[in-house]
Image (cartoon, helix red, strand yellow):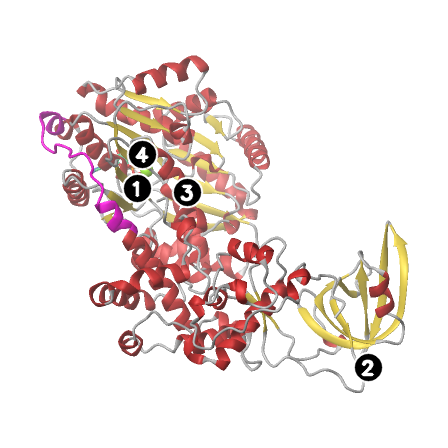
Amino acid sequence: MPMPETSKANSDKNKAKPAISVAMSMDQISVNELAGVGPKIAEKLARLNISTAQDLLLHLPYRYEDRTRITAINQLRAGEKHLIQGEIELCDTVFARKRMLVCRLSDVTSSINLRFFHFNQQQKSALRKGNTIQCFGEVRFSFGNKIEMIHPEFKIINKDDPPPLKQSLTPVYPVTEGLHQLSLRKFINQVLLMLKANPGSLTDHLPDQLIKKFKLQSLHDAIDFIHQPPASVSESEIESGRSQFIKRLAFDELLAHHLGLRSLREKMKLCKAPKFKSESDLFLRFKQALPFSLTQAQDRVISELSADCSSGLPMMRLLQGDVGSGKTLVAAFAALQAIISDFQVALMVPTEILANQHVQSFRHWFDALGIKTVLLTGKLTVVQRREALELIASNKAKMIIGTHALFQRDVFFANLGFIVVDEQHRFGVHQRLALKEKGLKKGEQVHQLIMTATPIPRTLAMTAYADLDVSIIDELPAGRQEIKTVALAQNRREDVIARVHVNCRAGQQAYWVCTLIEESESLQCQAAEETAKQLRESLGDIKIGLVHGRMKSKEKEQVMASFKQGDIDLLIATTVIEVGVDVPNASLIVIENAERLGLAQLHQLRGRVGRGSTQSHCVLLYQAPLSEISNQRIAVMRESGDGFYIAQKDLEIRGPGEVLGTRQTGGLFFKVADLSRDKELVPLVKQCAEMLIEQWPEKVKPIIYSWIDEQANYASV
Ligand code: ADP
Ligand code: MG
């Protein structure tokens, strides 16, 4: 087959290999023993974490191609991949900016152009006029709105005796540089044939009793199915996860992750951590100085944290609480315990604006108690930075608040005992760990509190955060009112401006958020600048401020401070204010381009208001017409203010990959499992994990490592 893509495996290919003993099990057969695998290929396979035949079987396709039938050329649809068959009518080398080979392929229904930019003489002669070929590739529109295929795979066939079509969908596997799809497919096929000859050679680490108890398919059948699903099964059917075979694999994968995170946690429990004192004068003084009393939920969580931090084991706790539920104060109480016990605390936040705000809050709370708070961001001047580093290294600063700058190489903490990560979905696991490393001393671990306002549904938290304990603030401070939310099309913009005007004239404050989905910060800033100009023209009698990411730190800080003090009525902002910003007097927020934002982001943005006791409003401005998904999202925003409900809906609409994001889960990336699709498996997985640990502890490691690469995932955590 003159595919443009020949594997470099050729040199390895023809060496005679000793026959593999039938009695051997798949996890004892090294890939080196397979035909076509030499040291070079073995090294490339190792990069995919494949070293045994069993690893190859568990290297799963991420999609399929349908080569089980031939599509008539007049039935082709652009954007899809199809197998076609026809006769070459014309084959020409043409020069249109670049040299290329263009062929015209016809069947009885119509014709299509094939275009090649790289080709050799052999390929050119294979594509000779009059030859019949089978061809597989993606159909697209060319400039003249005609359909074409670019660089399709093709083979010459005998018209009167065409080769049989594939009986099953063709799997597409994740590959690595220098290891081609076709080679990988060949190796996996080889192993599948071996498996067919000797079905007992596949080791299923899950004990029979558990397979029966949880009504699972055999691993053997599941593996067979996923590598070569019968032509009668469509790809969407496989994705929908209805197949019991897919369920079995998803079950195993979730189980491996769950066990992996649990063992990580066990490992942490073997470490020691400082014991914080929980009672002291300062603690009471702090509590009494607050202008309000803590909610019951806050009180409960504070006790949970105290218990953890006085146990002598490192705390690893995730604190979930909806936007505005008062997580900062809870963190302050925990921080106070560390400080009373003579340790330093580092609080890491994703944005400079938030770092500044937290510094103000903590100074407001802690200065009176004689505790020094310092700020460390990347935007400090050289002198400021030197001063901050000195205070941190000399143990004079006890409460250290900052951005990523906190874990840079030249930052030395005198005695770091507690780290808090706020808005953790903005950070990766490795960033949390980098900060944690700053506190390592004499074999002791720091305590960690990880806070998030992006609520994670319980089932998900159990799987994605099995290494963390979870505390939940499930109550808002007294007197809060539900934010009233409306959605209006852009053509009502003037009405919205009028309403902002009325509100601000009446002494309330408002946000106007300019968002753009494009990751281009400069475009977003531009949009905000233009909006500010326009609104300043039409609303001359209210005070308007502007804040965006391109402004100098000092300017940003000043604008935010004036807004907080009430000197600015209307703040035009980009998404720099998305997380954490707390100005309780602001009671109206207008969000532009709401149709382009995800639910989590909308909920976060809306959470900037409704932080005081006045009735707050949120206006979602959108560009009509709304797509189906945007429509659903906006409906959810209008019907609920409950972050957990919204997160659940988000899962249903988008799937969990996006809710968590790979950054948030720190490498929680599944091959087959899908947490929203497979959510009913999660409690079973947990139950199964417990039984395994109880009764078959020796199986735990093999199960983890058949799915998870030790090095990449857990070794360093
Ligand atoms: P989030 O959980 O979103 O981080 P914050 O910690 O920013 O919320 O708190 C939101 C606002 O609620 C702040 O202005 C804070 O001072 C206030 N707050 C916190 N706890 C209480 C409480 N128990 N009663 C009244 N207001 C509170
Ligand atoms: Mg917060």
Type of amino acid at the residue the image marks with label 3: Gly
Question: Which dot, 1 or 3, sits closer to the camera?
Answer: 3
Question: Which dot, 3 or 4, sits closer to the camera?
Answer: 3
Q: Residue 546 location in percent, x, y?
A: 49, 28
Asked whether, in this view, residue 299 is left or right of residue 681, the answer is left
Depicted 26 relative to depicted 221: above or below: above
Q: Residue 404 location in percent, x, y?
A: 41, 31
Depicted 223 relative to depicted 542: above or below: below
Q: Earlier in the sequence, mark 1 or mark 2?
A: 2
Judged from the image, the secondary structure of the residue bearing numbered disc 3 is loop
Judged from the image, the secondary structure of the residue bearing numbered disc 2 is loop
**Label 1 within 8 A of ligand 2 by Cβ:** no
Question: Is residue 294 on the magenta stretch?
Answer: no
Residue under label 1? 450
Residue under label 3? 428
Residue under label 4? 584
Residue drawn where x is 50% and y is 65% of the image: 56
Q: Is residue 569 visible?
A: no
